[in-house]
Image (cartoon, rainbow, N blue to C red):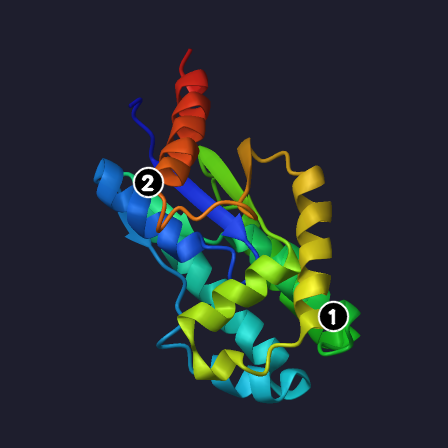
């Protein structure tokens, strides 16, 4: 495997980012860097009242992700990151603004902070996007059984998927690998995980060829 510094995994809620990050970490000795979920002070409130807590949640995630970028830059190891700072702005904050949960004034303040931060952000060596349709996402969310996610609406997931597809279609920050996971189970089926690994290795080898 060629030497890389930063692998990032993007995808909607329930697409399998965290699980894939864990498995790749074990496969290659990479250090997984996870999204702050269990210790997030706003997430549970957000799913109960999106309009009240949307701005607070997005600022928390933005700051958390920026701190992760600092950790990646300072680390001497290869990091596999669960979700990127790009998604915070282009997917989640954008969707909440379009849906009316973040007003124009707060959204502009958010974008001002994001645009200041992004100048210090170096793109991952490889971005892996896990593409999943709504039935797959719903199944995966139900399977992990987080009580605060019971309030997630199908329309919310659908809107996020639309934002993801628009963002991925114009992604130009670096190398991109799109993996359709609708018919894959890389936890239970070794051959499915091997399939993903082979695609990743092909992309990483091409970086240095």
Against 203, residue 76 (above or below) is: below
Against 186, residue 99 (above or below) is: below
In this rendered view, identify the residue nearer to me: 89 or 133: 133
Q: On the rendered structure, is 100 left or right of 30? A: right
Q: Which marked residue is nearer to the observer: mark 2 or mark 1? A: 2
Against 88, residue 29 (above or below) is: above
Tell me the crowding category of disc 1: few under 14, some 14 to 19, or many 20 or more residues within 10 angstroms, Cα based.
some
How many callouts does the rendering have? Answer: 2
The spot of residue 128 in percent (x, y) is 49, 40
Q: Earlier in the sequence, mark 2 or mark 1?
A: 1
Outermost top residue: 209
Q: Which mark, residue 190?
A: 2
Q: On the rendered structure, is 122 left or right of 96? A: left
In this rendered view, identify the residue nearer to me: 133 or 26: 133
In this rendered view, identify the residue nearer to me: 77 or 23: 23
Q: Which mark, residue 97?
A: 1
Q: Secondary structure at mark 2?
A: helix
Q: Secondary structure at mark 1?
A: helix
The answer to whether residue 74 is visible is: no
Screen quadrant of the C terminus: top left
The residue shown at (45%, 57%) is 66
Screen quadrant of the N terminus: top left
The spot of residue 22 in percent (x, y) is 30, 51
Q: On the rendered structure, is 120 left or right of 71? A: right
- Cβ–Cβ under 8 Å for marks 2 and 1: no
Q: Residue 87 sits in which quadrant? A: bottom right
The residue shown at (67%, 61%) is 160
In this rendered view, identify the residue nearer to me: 9 or 174: 9
The residue shown at (38%, 49%) is 20
């Amino acid at each position: 495997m060629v030497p890389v510094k930063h692998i990032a995994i993007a995808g909607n809620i329930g697409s399998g980012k965290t699980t894939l990050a864990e498995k790749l970490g074990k496969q290659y000795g990479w250090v997984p860097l996870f999204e702050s979920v269990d210790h997030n002070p706003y997430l549970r409130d957000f799913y109960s009242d999106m309009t009240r807590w949307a701005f607070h949640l997005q600022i928390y995630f933005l700051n958390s992700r920026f701190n992760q970028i600092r950790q990646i830059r300072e680390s001497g190891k290869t990091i596999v990151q669960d979700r990127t700072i790009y998604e915070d702005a282009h997917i989640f904050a954008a969707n909440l603004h379009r849906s009316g949960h973040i007003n124009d004034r707060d959204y502009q303040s958010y974008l001002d902070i994001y645009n200041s931060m992004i100048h210090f952000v170096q793109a991952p060596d490889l971005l892996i996007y896990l593409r999943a349709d709504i039935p797959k996402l719903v199944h995966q969310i139900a399977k992990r059984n987080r009580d605060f996610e019971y309030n997630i609406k199908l329309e919310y997931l659908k809107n996020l998927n639309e934002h993801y597809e628009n963002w991925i279609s114009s992604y130009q920050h670096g190398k991109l690998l799109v993996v359709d996971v609708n018919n894959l189970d890389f936890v239970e089926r070794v051959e499915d995980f091997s399939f993903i690994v082979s695609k990743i290795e092909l992309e990483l080898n091409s970086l240095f060829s």
